[in-house]
Image (tube, grey):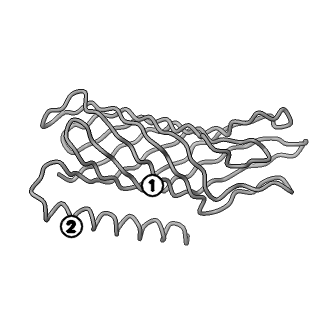
C-alpha cells in the first residue's frame, strides 16, 4: 500500500508539473497523458536447475509526456506488477514483482495527422523494485534493473493504444541468472 501511495504521489507531481509547463507554453509539441494496461511476463534464466516456469498476468498504470512532432521523446513513470512461478531444487517459488518503471523512449511518427498517428519508439527501460520478491534461501533479487523497450502504437484523437516489449538486459537475480521480459498492451488518454 505504501508503494501505491508513493507512485500516486509521484504521478500526480509529474502530471501537475507537465500540465503547468504545457499551460505556460503555446507549443503543440508537448503532450502528456495517463495510461494503463496488462502485462505478460517471463523470467528468463540459463540455469538448468530452474524449471516449470510460468509467467502470470500483471498490470501497469502510469503517466507520460511526449515532446516533439514527427520525431519525439517520451519519458514515462509507471507502476508495474507481474509475477512468475518456477521450481528450483524441488521447491516451488512465486516471485511477485511490484516495480516503479521509467522508460525513456525516442520515437518516430510514421503517420502524423491531427487525428491519427502511427508511431514506433525505443529506448532504455529502468526498473526499481518497490517490494523485493521472495527468492530461494541464499539468493536475493536486486532493487534496480535495466533493459530496453520497443513500442508500437496508434493515437486516435486523444486515445492512445500501445503494444510494447521490454527486454531485460541486466539480471534481476544474479545468482539465479534471471532476466525479466515483459509484453504489454495498453490504452491511454493524452491531454492536448
Q: Quadrant of the N terminus?
A: bottom right
| Image position of 116 with respect to 170: above or below | above
Please, what secondary structure does the residue beneath circle 1 have?
strand
Q: Position of residue 9 (x, y in %)?
A: 41, 71
Please provide percent x and percent y for residue 94.
73, 49
Q: What element carries label 2?
A: helix
Q: Nearer the viewer, residue 149 or 82?
A: 149
Q: Is residue 85 left or right of residue 10?
A: right
Q: How far apart are marks 1 and 2 (CA)?
A: 20 Å
- Residue closest to the far top: 110
Q: Mark 2 points at which residue?
A: 20
**Residue 10 falls left or right of residue 170:** left
Q: Is residue 25 found left or right of 109 in the rendered image? A: left
Please report the residue visible at 29 percent of the width from the left and 41 percent of the height from the top: 160
Q: Quadrant of residue 69?
A: top left
In which quadrant of the rendered view does residue 177 lie?
top right
Residue 159 percent across, percent down from the top left: 25, 43
Could you tell me which residue is drawn at 13 percent across and 49 percent down?
A: 28
Report which residue position mark 1 lands on. Answer: 78
Q: In the rendered view, does 174 fall on the left or right side of 154?
A: right
Q: Is residue 21 above or below residue 170?
A: below
- Judge by depth and name the residue closer to the eye, 149 or 186: 149
The residue shown at (30%, 52%) is: 65
Residues packed near mark 2 inside 10 Å, few (<14), some (14 to 19) or many (20 plus): few
Amino acid at each position: 500500500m505504501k508503494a501505491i501511495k508513493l507512485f500516486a504521489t509521484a504521478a500526480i507531481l509529474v502530471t501537475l508539473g507537465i500540465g503547468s509547463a504545457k499551460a505556460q507554453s503555446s507549443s503543440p509539441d508537448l503532450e502528456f497523458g495517463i495510461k494503463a494496461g496488462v502485462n505478460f511476463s517471463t523470467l528468463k534464466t540459463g540455469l538448468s536447475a530452474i524449471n516449470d516456469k510460468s509467467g502470470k498476468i500483471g498490470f501497469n498504470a502510469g503517466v507520460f509526456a511526449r515532446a516533439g512532432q514527427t520525431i519525439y521523446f517520451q519519458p514515462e513513470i509507471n507502476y508495474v506488477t507481474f509475477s512468475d512461478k518456477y521450481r528450483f531444487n524441488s521447491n516451488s517459488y512465486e516471485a511477485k514483482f511490484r516495480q516503479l518503471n521509467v522508460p525513456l523512449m525516442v520515437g518516430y511518427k510514421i503517420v502524423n495527422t491531427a487525428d491519427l498517428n502511427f508511431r514506433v519508439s525505443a529506448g532504455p527501460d529502468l526498473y526499481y523494485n518497490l517490494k523485493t520478491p521472495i527468492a530461494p534461501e541464499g539468493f536475493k533479487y536486486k532493487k534496480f534493473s535495466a533493459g530496453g523497450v520497443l513500442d508500437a502504437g496508434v493515437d486516435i484523437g486523444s486515445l492512445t493504444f500501445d503494444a510494447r516489449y521490454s527486454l531485460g538486459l541486466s539480471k534481476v537475480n544474479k545468482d539465479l541468472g534471471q532476466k525479466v521480459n515483459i509484453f504489454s498492451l495498453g490504452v491511454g488518454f493524452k491531454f492536448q
